[in-house]
């Protein structure tokens, strides 16, 4: 049995191959045409020499295309009178205390937002569909979102057929296909993002399939944002499914590492070159959410409950108008990268600061030699320790958001540090949160790729109801249910197993401080998933190691820094367990 996982990052592409109980890992530089990096990484671990049972790929192509606004020329079709929903949004301010802050511009300009005469209400048909009322327009991608199509998709299907007839080369997405949930704006936003990214991701995935075929590799599966996997064709049809593909794989890997170390409650800390992703893992399972925002746009799809901040090894240090030191979110990226990479980079970065502080070796994993003199020159009058302190403060904000601000005491959790830069900062962050245990996997630098190997196969489903709970009838025995008190605008998600009503009352009391068991409940949605467990994963024990801070520990794909007061032990396990005094 051989399982391959390849995660493409901004600087390196990581590969992990699990074959007959042996784990092989490799890092290769990421090139602009990322499909070539994937094939090269597969060759580096010898994947072409062994028949593959499964090949899973994590990518940020869709995320980057959305962040950089490099998607297709998209049109939006809505119910006449509601065609401007993307621009109307929720009528809330972009920031509570910054009255002049702008919302992100919609992906579709007003002139390409059109309406079609029809109307379906919660009780059924109100106005018949008039396809002749659909105006002519031209676009590379089309998003269709009609009122109440989550309850009756008949009109939406007919409009989609008409648009595909008129624009046979366009990528057309209807909301019932990707996000059949109530809340019109979030559904419209998700559908528009899905359509906008379709052509770009389809081109990449098509090229990836061709390169893999030429290299004798199996066609890869793609990691979903929810932590499961989907086929290339599914990802090409609905790119919104894989928006946080790579980071989700890292959380899967962190949860598996924590479980192997006998730790049920942990917080994952994935610090790469551009950003840091954190996620709470409770009871051995990564937290999941019904949706999230990406680039300021709501995406209503199941996702691993990540929080991301623009803090990475390549984050650039700068001073604002008041002279205060800031770090990120701008990043030196992979090209030219930090100044110490010796690729003509001139901006001071977090990696440069760590090198000057003596926390990095002369040669990084992947054979990249570091230039200390270039790092010192780039930093100039910036204090290296201050740069590290500022970027740590940014990561602390995300760690507190997933723990303290949600009612969890971080002292009850271990920190799982990975990514190329995560183990460099983990102990300092743990000290701030009074966390006494940090897990640093031997495969910290390639843990996202390891998560791709260990990932389950998962198919998520959601059905919207918006009816009194007592009228719901027979519900699935497993899954989750969105409930709220009648008259409320927002719901809580609780397990279907046991007594969902009582679970909701308890969750409401924990979140808001009270519960009203006499008040009627409303069923909003039922969420279920078909899950096939991932392969068994056993990590071979590493060389015994005991180390006391201050110390630098070089790993295969990352570097770990132990400040004074911290000790590290690896005894019969490949994971380095750090404990603070």
Image (cartoon, helix red, strand yellow):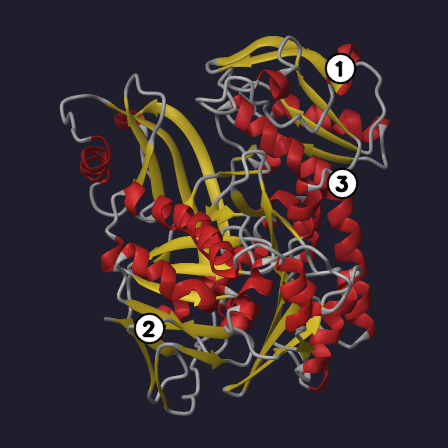
In the image, farthest residue toward the bottom? 543
- The quadrant of the rendering that contains the C terminus is bottom left
Depth check, front residue: 433 or 549? 549
**Which x, y percent locates residue 202?**
76, 49
Q: Which circle's residue, 1 or 2, is located before the other in the chain?
A: 1
**Residue located at (35% from left, 23% from top):** 467
Residue marked by disc 2: 564
Helix, strand or loop status at disc 3: loop
Is residue 46 visible in the rendered image? The answer is yes
Is residue 495 visible in the rendered image? The answer is no
The residues bearing labels 1 and 2 have C-alpha atoms spaced at a distance of 71 Å
Give the image quarter of residue 112. top right
**Which x, y percent locates residue 116?**
71, 13
**Residue located at (85% from left, 25% from top):** 138
Depth check, front residue: 169 or 95? 95
Crowd band around label 1 with a 10 angstrom C-alpha radius: few (<14), some (14–19), many (20+): some
- The answer to whether the residue labelled 3 contacts the one labelled 1, judged by CB atoms less than 8 Å apart, is no
Residue marked by disc 3: 70
Q: How many marks?
A: 3
Residue marked by disc 1: 131
Q: Which mark lies nearer to you, 2 or 3?
A: 2
Q: Is residue 509 left or right of residue 133?
A: left
Q: Is residue 368 left or right of residue 512?
A: right
């Amino acid at each position: 049995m051989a399982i391959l996982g390849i995660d493409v990052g901004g600087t390196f592409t990581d590969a992990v191959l699990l074959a007959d109980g042996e784990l092989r890992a490799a890092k290769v530089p990421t090139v602009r045409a990322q499909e070539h990096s994937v094939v090269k990484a597969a060759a580096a671990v010898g994947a072409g020499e062994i028949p593959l049972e499964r090949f899973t790929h994590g990518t940020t192509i869709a995320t980057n295309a959305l962040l950089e606004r490099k998607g297709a020329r998209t049109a939006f079709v809505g119910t006449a009178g509601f065609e401007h929903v993307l621009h109307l949004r929720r009528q809330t301010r972009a920031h509570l205390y910054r009255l002049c802050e702008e919302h992100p511009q919609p992906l579709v300009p007003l002139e390409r937002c059109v309406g079609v005469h029809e109307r379906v209400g919660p009780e059924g048909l109100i106005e018949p569909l008039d396809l002749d009322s659909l105006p002519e327009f031209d676009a590379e991608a089309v998003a269709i979102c009609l009122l109440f199509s989550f309850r009756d998709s008949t009109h939406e299907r007919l409009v989609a057929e008409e648009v595909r007839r008129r624009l046979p080369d366009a990528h057309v997405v209807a909301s019932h296909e990707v996000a059949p949930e109530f809340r019109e704006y979030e559904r419209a936003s998700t559908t528009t993002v899905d359509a906008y990214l379709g052509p770009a991701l389809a081109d990449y995935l098509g090229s990836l399939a061709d390169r893999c075929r030429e290299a004798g590799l199996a066609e890869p599966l793609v990691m979903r944002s929810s932590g499961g996997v989907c086929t290339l064709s599914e990802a090409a049809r609905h790119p919104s499914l894989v928006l946080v593909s790579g980071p989700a794989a890292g959380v899967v890997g962190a949860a598996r590492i924590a479980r192997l170390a006998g730790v049920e409650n942990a917080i994952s800390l994935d610090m790469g070159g551009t950003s840091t992703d954190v996620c709470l893992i409770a009871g051995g399972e990564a937290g999941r959410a019904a949706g999230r925002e990406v680039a300021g746009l709501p995406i209503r799809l199941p996702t691993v409950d990540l929080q991301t901040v623009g803090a990475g090894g390549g984050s650039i240090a700068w001073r604002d108008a008041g002279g205060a030191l800031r770090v990120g979110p701008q990043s030196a990226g992979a090209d030219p990268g930090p100044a110490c990479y010796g690729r003509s980079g001139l901006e001071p970065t977090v990696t440069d600061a760590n090198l000057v502080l003596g926390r990095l070796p002369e040669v990084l994993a992947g054979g990249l030699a570091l230039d200390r003199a270039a790092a010192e020159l780039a930093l100039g009058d910036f204090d290296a320790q201050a740069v590290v302190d500022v970027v740590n403060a940014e990561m602390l904000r995300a760690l507190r958001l997933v723990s303290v601000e949600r009612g969890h005491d971080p002292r009850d959790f271990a920190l799982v540090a990975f990514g190329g830069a995560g183990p460099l900062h983990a102990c300092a962050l743990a000290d701030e949160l009074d966390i006494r245990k940090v897990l640093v996997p031997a495969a910290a630098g390639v843990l996202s790729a390891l998560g791709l190997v260990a990932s389950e196969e998962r198919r998520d489903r959601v059905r919207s109801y918006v009816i009194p709970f007592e009228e719901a009838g027979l519900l699935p025995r497993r899954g989750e249910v969105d409930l709220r008190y009648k008259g409320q605008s927002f719901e809580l998600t609780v397990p279907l197993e046991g007594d969902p009503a009582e679970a909701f009352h308890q969750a409401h009391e924990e979140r808001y401080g009270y519960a009203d068991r006499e008040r009627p409940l409303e069923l909003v949605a039922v969420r279920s998933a078909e899950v096939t467990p991932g392969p068994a994963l056993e990590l071979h024990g590493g060389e015994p190691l005991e180390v006391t801070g201050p110390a630098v520990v070089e790993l295969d794909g990352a570097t770990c820094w132990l400040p004074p007061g911290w000790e590290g032990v690896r005894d019969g396990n490949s994971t380095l367990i750090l404990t603070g005094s």
